[in-house]
Amino acid sequence: MIGKTALISGASYGIGLELAKLMASKGHDLVLLARTKMRLCEIQKNLQDEYGIEVYVIVCDLSLPNACEGVYQKIKMMDLEIDILINNAAIGDWGLFVDSNMEKQKQMLQLNIAALTDLTRLFLPGMVKRRTGKIMNIASTAAFQPGPLMAVYYASKAYVLSFSSALAQELKGSGVTVTCLCPGPTATHFQGSTFPNEVRLTDGQRLADPDDVAKYGIKAMLKGQVVAVHGVLNRIMAINVRFLPQWIILPLVHFMQDQK
Protein backbone atom coordinates (compact mmCIF):
# COMPACT_ATOMS: atom_id res chain seq x y z
CA MET A 1 0.00 0.00 0.00
CA ILE A 2 2.94 2.32 -0.62
CA GLY A 3 1.86 5.77 -1.77
CA LYS A 4 -1.61 5.57 -0.28
CA THR A 5 -3.17 8.39 1.76
CA ALA A 6 -4.09 7.85 5.40
CA LEU A 7 -6.50 10.01 7.39
CA ILE A 8 -5.83 9.97 11.15
CA SER A 9 -8.00 11.71 13.73
CA GLY A 10 -6.62 12.72 17.11
CA ALA A 11 -3.15 12.82 15.56
CA SER A 12 -1.43 15.40 17.75
CA TYR A 13 -0.37 13.20 20.69
CA GLY A 14 -0.12 9.66 22.00
CA ILE A 15 -1.20 6.69 19.92
CA GLY A 16 -2.50 8.93 17.11
CA LEU A 17 0.88 10.64 16.72
CA GLU A 18 2.73 7.32 16.75
CA LEU A 19 0.36 5.95 14.12
CA ALA A 20 1.08 9.01 11.97
CA LYS A 21 4.84 8.45 12.28
CA LEU A 22 4.50 4.79 11.32
CA MET A 23 2.29 5.55 8.34
CA ALA A 24 4.75 8.20 7.21
CA SER A 25 7.67 5.78 7.57
CA LYS A 26 5.85 3.40 5.20
CA GLY A 27 5.61 6.10 2.54
CA HIS A 28 1.99 7.09 3.02
CA ASP A 29 0.79 10.65 2.59
CA LEU A 30 -1.22 11.85 5.56
CA VAL A 31 -4.25 13.92 6.44
CA LEU A 32 -4.07 14.74 10.15
CA LEU A 33 -7.02 15.95 12.22
CA ALA A 34 -6.80 17.64 15.61
CA ARG A 35 -7.93 20.80 17.39
CA THR A 36 -4.56 22.56 17.84
CA LYS A 37 -3.18 24.23 14.72
CA MET A 38 0.29 24.99 16.07
CA ARG A 39 0.84 21.40 17.17
CA LEU A 40 -0.43 19.98 13.88
CA CYS A 41 1.79 22.27 11.83
CA GLU A 42 4.81 21.24 13.88
CA ILE A 43 4.06 17.57 13.23
CA GLN A 44 3.42 18.30 9.56
CA LYS A 45 6.86 19.88 9.09
CA ASN A 46 8.68 17.17 11.02
CA LEU A 47 7.10 14.31 9.09
CA GLN A 48 7.51 15.95 5.70
CA ASP A 49 11.16 16.74 6.40
CA GLU A 50 11.97 13.27 7.72
CA TYR A 51 10.05 11.08 5.30
CA GLY A 52 9.55 13.21 2.17
CA ILE A 53 5.80 12.67 2.11
CA GLU A 54 2.86 15.06 1.82
CA VAL A 55 1.12 15.91 5.09
CA TYR A 56 -2.14 17.84 5.08
CA VAL A 57 -3.59 19.22 8.30
CA ILE A 58 -7.20 20.01 9.09
CA VAL A 59 -7.88 21.84 12.33
CA CYS A 60 -11.27 20.78 13.63
CA ASP A 61 -13.21 19.77 16.73
CA LEU A 62 -14.89 16.47 15.91
CA SER A 63 -17.04 16.71 19.02
CA LEU A 64 -19.08 19.38 17.20
CA PRO A 65 -22.04 18.29 15.06
CA ASN A 66 -21.39 18.42 11.29
CA ALA A 67 -17.60 18.63 11.81
CA CYS A 68 -17.08 15.37 9.92
CA GLU A 69 -18.99 16.62 6.89
CA GLY A 70 -16.74 19.68 6.90
CA VAL A 71 -13.65 17.46 6.93
CA TYR A 72 -15.03 15.40 4.06
CA GLN A 73 -15.73 18.48 1.95
CA LYS A 74 -12.25 19.91 2.57
CA ILE A 75 -10.64 16.65 1.48
CA LYS A 76 -12.80 16.62 -1.65
CA MET A 77 -11.61 20.15 -2.42
CA MET A 78 -8.02 18.92 -2.04
CA ASP A 79 -8.83 16.22 -4.63
CA LEU A 80 -7.57 13.50 -2.29
CA GLU A 81 -8.69 9.90 -1.98
CA ILE A 82 -8.53 8.36 1.49
CA ASP A 83 -7.23 4.80 1.32
CA ILE A 84 -6.67 4.26 5.05
CA LEU A 85 -8.96 5.71 7.72
CA ILE A 86 -7.79 5.63 11.34
CA ASN A 87 -10.43 6.78 13.82
CA ASN A 88 -8.36 7.51 16.92
CA ALA A 89 -9.84 10.67 18.44
CA ALA A 90 -11.61 10.09 21.77
CA ILE A 91 -12.04 11.54 25.23
CA GLY A 92 -12.84 10.02 28.62
CA ASP A 93 -14.26 11.12 31.94
CA TRP A 94 -13.96 9.68 35.45
CA GLY A 95 -16.41 9.74 38.34
CA LEU A 96 -19.93 8.83 39.32
CA PHE A 97 -22.36 9.37 36.44
CA VAL A 98 -24.87 11.07 38.75
CA ASP A 99 -22.29 13.78 39.49
CA SER A 100 -20.97 14.09 35.94
CA ASN A 101 -21.03 17.12 33.71
CA MET A 102 -23.85 16.58 31.20
CA GLU A 103 -22.11 18.52 28.43
CA LYS A 104 -18.94 16.47 28.86
CA GLN A 105 -20.93 13.24 28.49
CA LYS A 106 -22.62 14.54 25.33
CA GLN A 107 -19.25 15.62 23.94
CA MET A 108 -17.87 12.15 24.63
CA LEU A 109 -20.72 10.45 22.82
CA GLN A 110 -20.37 12.79 19.88
CA LEU A 111 -16.62 12.25 19.55
CA ASN A 112 -16.21 8.61 20.54
CA ILE A 113 -19.27 7.29 18.71
CA ALA A 114 -20.91 9.75 16.30
CA ALA A 115 -17.75 11.20 14.74
CA LEU A 116 -16.18 7.77 14.28
CA THR A 117 -19.37 6.53 12.63
CA ASP A 118 -19.72 9.62 10.44
CA LEU A 119 -16.14 9.54 9.16
CA THR A 120 -16.46 5.86 8.39
CA ARG A 121 -19.72 6.38 6.49
CA LEU A 122 -18.31 9.31 4.54
CA PHE A 123 -15.08 7.66 3.35
CA LEU A 124 -16.14 4.02 3.10
CA PRO A 125 -18.09 4.31 -0.21
CA GLY A 126 -14.97 5.48 -2.05
CA MET A 127 -12.99 2.53 -0.71
CA VAL A 128 -15.69 0.07 -1.70
CA LYS A 129 -15.92 1.61 -5.17
CA ARG A 130 -12.13 1.26 -5.61
CA ARG A 131 -12.28 -2.21 -4.04
CA THR A 132 -9.40 -1.39 -1.72
CA GLY A 133 -9.05 0.27 1.65
CA LYS A 134 -8.40 -0.19 5.34
CA ILE A 135 -10.17 1.19 8.39
CA MET A 136 -8.79 1.09 11.92
CA ASN A 137 -11.03 2.09 14.80
CA ILE A 138 -9.35 2.59 18.16
CA ALA A 139 -11.41 1.09 20.96
CA SER A 140 -9.97 -0.12 24.28
CA THR A 141 -9.93 -3.10 26.61
CA ALA A 142 -12.77 -1.10 28.19
CA ALA A 143 -14.91 -2.39 25.32
CA PHE A 144 -15.18 -5.88 26.80
CA GLN A 145 -17.09 -5.08 30.02
CA PRO A 146 -19.10 -2.31 31.68
CA GLY A 147 -17.05 0.27 33.56
CA PRO A 148 -18.37 1.76 36.80
CA LEU A 149 -16.90 5.26 37.37
CA MET A 150 -16.39 5.58 33.59
CA ALA A 151 -19.81 4.34 32.52
CA VAL A 152 -20.21 6.38 29.33
CA TYR A 153 -16.60 5.91 28.18
CA TYR A 154 -16.71 2.13 28.55
CA ALA A 155 -20.07 1.99 26.78
CA SER A 156 -18.73 4.13 23.93
CA LYS A 157 -15.81 1.74 23.41
CA ALA A 158 -18.17 -1.25 23.46
CA TYR A 159 -19.99 0.46 20.59
CA VAL A 160 -16.74 0.85 18.65
CA LEU A 161 -15.91 -2.84 19.05
CA SER A 162 -19.41 -4.01 18.08
CA PHE A 163 -19.67 -1.60 15.14
CA SER A 164 -16.23 -2.52 13.80
CA SER A 165 -16.85 -6.28 14.03
CA ALA A 166 -20.20 -6.03 12.28
CA LEU A 167 -18.81 -3.78 9.56
CA ALA A 168 -15.87 -6.13 8.97
CA GLN A 169 -18.35 -8.95 8.32
CA GLU A 170 -20.42 -6.82 5.94
CA LEU A 171 -17.31 -5.90 3.95
CA LYS A 172 -15.94 -9.40 3.42
CA GLY A 173 -15.00 -9.83 -0.22
CA SER A 174 -15.15 -6.07 -0.90
CA GLY A 175 -11.40 -5.43 -0.75
CA VAL A 176 -11.90 -3.26 2.36
CA THR A 177 -10.96 -4.48 5.84
CA VAL A 178 -11.85 -3.15 9.29
CA THR A 179 -9.62 -3.54 12.34
CA CYS A 180 -10.58 -2.64 15.89
CA LEU A 181 -7.50 -1.94 18.01
CA CYS A 182 -8.06 -2.42 21.74
CA PRO A 183 -5.18 -1.13 23.88
CA GLY A 184 -5.11 -1.27 27.65
CA PRO A 185 -3.87 1.63 29.80
CA THR A 186 -1.21 3.43 27.76
CA ALA A 187 1.29 6.14 28.69
CA THR A 188 -0.41 9.05 26.93
CA HIS A 189 -1.83 12.40 28.02
CA PHE A 190 -5.26 10.69 28.03
CA GLN A 191 -4.38 8.99 31.31
CA GLY A 192 -3.31 12.21 33.03
CA SER A 193 -6.22 14.23 31.73
CA THR A 194 -8.88 11.62 32.56
CA PHE A 195 -7.94 9.91 35.81
CA PRO A 196 -7.39 11.49 39.23
CA ASN A 197 -4.37 10.50 41.32
CA GLU A 198 -4.03 7.02 42.79
CA VAL A 199 -6.59 5.16 40.71
CA ARG A 200 -5.79 1.48 41.23
CA LEU A 201 -5.98 0.68 37.50
CA THR A 202 -3.04 2.93 36.63
CA ASP A 203 -1.28 4.11 39.80
CA GLY A 204 2.14 2.51 40.06
CA GLN A 205 1.46 0.30 37.05
CA ARG A 206 3.72 -0.02 34.03
CA LEU A 207 1.67 1.48 31.21
CA ALA A 208 2.04 0.40 27.61
CA ASP A 209 4.20 2.51 25.32
CA PRO A 210 2.12 4.27 22.63
CA ASP A 211 4.72 3.39 19.99
CA ASP A 212 4.35 -0.32 20.80
CA VAL A 213 0.56 -0.04 20.67
CA ALA A 214 0.73 1.72 17.30
CA LYS A 215 3.11 -0.87 15.82
CA TYR A 216 0.85 -3.68 16.99
CA GLY A 217 -2.19 -1.94 15.52
CA ILE A 218 -0.60 -1.27 12.13
CA LYS A 219 0.57 -4.87 11.88
CA ALA A 220 -2.94 -6.11 12.66
CA MET A 221 -4.51 -3.68 10.19
CA LEU A 222 -2.20 -4.72 7.36
CA LYS A 223 -3.09 -8.37 8.02
CA GLY A 224 -6.80 -7.54 7.99
CA GLN A 225 -7.25 -8.73 11.59
CA VAL A 226 -10.69 -7.73 12.89
CA VAL A 227 -10.04 -7.42 16.64
CA ALA A 228 -6.54 -6.67 17.90
CA VAL A 229 -6.01 -6.56 21.68
CA HIS A 230 -2.58 -5.22 22.61
CA GLY A 231 -0.70 -7.05 25.37
CA VAL A 232 -0.77 -10.70 26.47
CA LEU A 233 -2.47 -10.00 29.80
CA ASN A 234 -5.05 -7.80 28.09
CA ARG A 235 -5.82 -10.58 25.61
CA ILE A 236 -6.28 -13.07 28.43
CA MET A 237 -8.59 -10.63 30.23
CA ALA A 238 -10.64 -9.97 27.10
CA ILE A 239 -11.23 -13.70 26.65
CA ASN A 240 -11.88 -14.55 30.29
CA VAL A 241 -14.26 -11.69 30.99
CA ARG A 242 -16.77 -13.24 28.61
CA PHE A 243 -17.08 -16.29 30.84
CA LEU A 244 -17.31 -14.54 34.20
CA PRO A 245 -20.70 -13.47 35.63
CA GLN A 246 -21.50 -9.78 35.95
CA TRP A 247 -21.74 -10.02 39.74
CA ILE A 248 -18.01 -10.73 39.74
CA ILE A 249 -16.94 -8.41 36.91
CA LEU A 250 -18.76 -5.23 37.95
CA PRO A 251 -17.46 -4.96 41.54
CA LEU A 252 -13.96 -5.87 40.35
CA VAL A 253 -13.90 -3.18 37.65
CA HIS A 254 -15.39 -0.70 40.12
CA PHE A 255 -12.63 -1.49 42.60
CA MET A 256 -9.86 -1.11 40.00
CA GLN A 257 -11.30 2.14 38.67
CA ASP A 258 -11.57 3.69 42.13
CA GLN A 259 -8.92 5.59 44.06
CA LYS A 260 -6.80 3.85 46.67
Image (cartoon, helix red, strand yellow):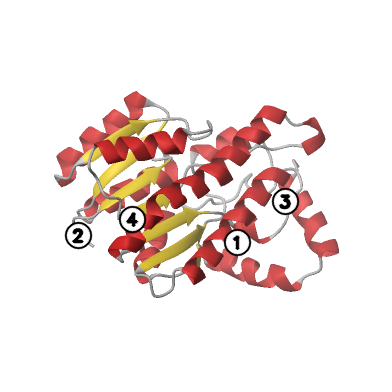
Query: Label 4's element?
Result: helix
Q: Position of residue 231 (x, y in %)?
A: 51, 64
Instruction: Evaluate whether residue 136 shows in this view.
Output: yes
Give how far apart the Cα atoms at labels 3 and 1 are: 16 Å
Q: Earlier in the sequence, mark 2 or mark 3?
A: 2
Nearer the camera: disc 1 or disc 4: 4
Give how far apart the Cα atoms at labels 1 and 4 are: 23 Å
Give the residue type that dot 2 points to.
Ile
Q: Nearer the viewer, residue 243 or 136?
A: 136
Q: Which residue is mark 4?
A: 126
* Other-residue count near label 1 (Cα within 10 Å), few / some / many at <14 / 14–19 / ≥20: some
Q: Image point 62% across, 47% down: which residue?
A: 202
- Furthest residue to the top? 38
Q: Image point 65% across, 34% down: which residue?
A: 106
Give the residue type that dot 3 points to.
Gly
Rendered position, 40 above or below 19? above
Q: Nearer the viewer, residue 44 or 103?
A: 103
